[in-house]
Amino acid sequence: MSNQDWDIIIKPRSKFKIIDINALFQYKDLLFLFVKRDLVSIYKQTLLGPLWLILQPVLTALMFNFVFGKMSGFSNDGTPSFLFYLSGVTIWTFFSDCCLKTSETFSSNANLFGKVYFPRLIVPLSVITSNIVKFGFTFLLFLVVLAFNLNSVSVGLHAFLLPVLILITAGLGLGFGLIISALTARYRDLKFLVQFGVQLLMFLSPVIYPISSLSGNLRSIILLNPMTSIIETFKFGFSGHGYFSWFYLGYSFAFMLILLLVGLFMFTRVERNFMDTV
Amino acid sequence: MAKTVILANNISKQYRLGNIGTGSAVHDLNRWWKRMNGKEDPYLKVGVENDRSIAGGEYVWALQDVNFKIQEGDVYGFIGRNGAGKSTLLKIISRITSPSTGEIKFKGKIASLLEVGTGFHPELTGRENIFLNGAILGMSKSEIKSKLDEIIEFSGVAKYVDTPIKRYSSGMLVRLGFAVAAHLETDILIVDEVLAVGDAEFQEKCIGKMKDVSKAGRTVLFVSHNMASIKSLCNKGILFDKGRVVTDGDISSVIEQYLSMNSKIIADGTIPVGSSSAGSGVAKFKKLQLFNSKNESVDFVGYNNPLRFQFGIESSLAVNDIISDVRIYSMDGIEFAHAMNKYTQTMISLKEGYNEISCSIDNSLQPGKYSITIGIHHANGMTIDFVENVFDFKVLSIPDGDGNGYIYDWKSGYVRLNSEWKNN
């Protein structure tokens, strides 16, 4: 019997193959069931249920508004301050949830991965999908708040870039998450730094301050952060106040592509023998 | 000729012992460096056997040079002691981990059942979990939908199907999990000892379902320690020991080899001097052996096969008409059965010198391990010699030769009483 007749061949090290689209497609139902599970199970046995999806970012934005806006007097670019913080928080929460949740792929699914095979990439993909859904809810809330402030902001054409922004953010979160998950599968040291790192990255992104309040070297450094142009474009599109540049948006996109490739490569390397080292 | 659906070539799997920590980083770097220079992995040493009882060594081979070929429609039983490498092989076949060397090729769709109810989420309802679990096992949503009613009916938890499964009893969870698994439609099915759960009625149902699967011409790989269920389900078997294949062939010959490998055959059955705990000492037990149907001295008997003991007694004088008895103890020390020559009015006498007495006991013992105490006494009850817990033996769940085995995974009592049942 020649090799072509076999459906599956298991070897110690497979050829350079990053992603098996066919296998992923076969398990697409599983992806959506995971999404459903994530969304349904989180808010079971809570009184407010899915309302928490909206309340969480509101509470964070209120806190930022109080601490950074009222107490510290940070600039908010001329946007009504609650709206300013809410727009930052909306995008940032999406990114950090994607990143943190994806980074736990191996550690929180060890039990499942030890018992049954399915393309492991389904798990991070389902995490990203459910976070897009959650983002949808937060964004609806954002639109409501925006509607109340229409007289002091101007929504521009750049708002139509939103799908691109979502795509890049999801890609960045997934890429970072995959790399971290691959690195923490064997040595868990990094796990302790991840939470801290994401928080640090938030302060290096224009979430609580506008890029217009910076100048010189600091501004150049902050612009190197791929999240910067996304948050600024979002604010520019929906409030008219912010920094927009095709160059930096393109930079974020390229950054996301490279990060995603590296992440996928590392992830596939680890998933093969992960169960022996967990 | 039937098609080959699984072909394994030189499968080996190495595991690292001890903790993964700071030391393993050094090994990883070393390994990476060697690979960059085109050399072999320095830690993949060939030729070290997997023997758990011997300490030492940082790496262990859980599997070594395993080769086999499985044909379409075969129901294969994987047999071996704990640590023989069965589970490692199942993990490799189910693609949970990859082998260190070698390759396996498959033809057709595979599903593995290493656990029932994998991925059940406690907060979701039974119905939602059927979908989730089915999808994890590789079914599509429409496939599950079309079988949903069957699955619910098979599980027998129809009443609770819209309740979160965290409220289920463990038995209900198992039933639900197996019900989903039983409706998987794949060419190759890999089953680990999942049948060792649930009540008797459900187990019968599961075994029946497994038989249907194999009758439908699908290939099944089955791992279990219950020889009775392996014997009733499988037609072929592979015996593993210390990570290697010992035998590959017909199921009954494989089981036989497994059992003889497992038992410690008593070479001569000598009872050590000073074992007696009571008695006048006129005569002494010297030897005790248990024989199977092939007249081999063993420490186990098949299910329902007679216990054939032979005693060697050294006597200093001739004693007419003695009482000779065997007391059977469970492993928790309960003396629950007794055999004695007087029950059958058999006359036994000792002559001066060496005597041999044989005793055959109908074996209605439940499968398990037992211990015996033996004694000889004068007709008036005075004890001549008495040796407590002289010998341990096992009753297997399958008979030696033909006949039915003990198919249940539970056990009640130590002895099956003869009984007649009828509808009135």
Image (spheres, helix red, strand yellow):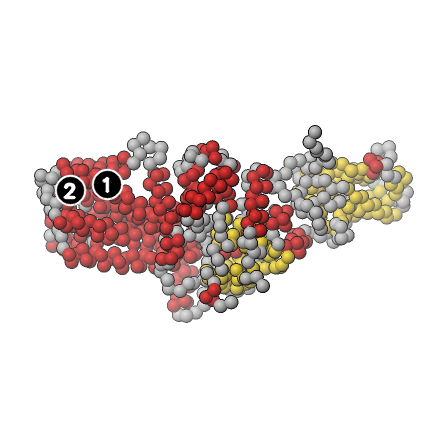
B233 to the left or right of B96: right
Which residue lies under the disc numbered 2? Answer: A84
- Where does residue B144 sit, x and y in percent of width and height? 44, 45
Which residue lies under the disc numbered 1? Answer: A138
Chain to which mark 2 belongs: A
- Where does residue A225 sit, x and y in percent of width and height? 20, 54
Q: Secondary structure at mark 1?
A: helix
Is residue A37 in sight in this rendering?
Answer: yes
Q: Secondary structure at mark 2?
A: helix
CA neighbours of label 2 inside 10 A, class few (<14), some (14 to 19), many (20+) = many
- Where does residue B215 sit, x and y in percent of width and height? 58, 51
A100 to the left or right of B3: left
**Picture residue at 51% right of the left edge, 40% below the top:** B154
Kind of residue indicated by mark 1: Thr
Chain to which mark 1 belongs: A
Within the image, what quadrant is residue B313 found in?
top right
**Picture residue at 82% right of the left edge, 35% below the top:** B343
**Picture residue at 46% right of the left edge, 66% below the top:** A4
Nearer to us of marks 1 and 2 is 1
In the image as oriented, which residue stretches furthest toward the bottom? B38
Say which of A145 and A174 sits in front: A145
The first of marks 1 and 2 along the sequence is 2
Alpha carbons under labels 1 and 2: distance apart: 14 Å
In the image as oriented, which residue stretches furthest toward the top? B424
Say which of A221 and B424 sits in front: B424
Kind of residue indicated by mark 2: Phe
- Where does residue B152 sit, x and y in percent of width and height? 48, 39
Image: B37 above or below B170: below
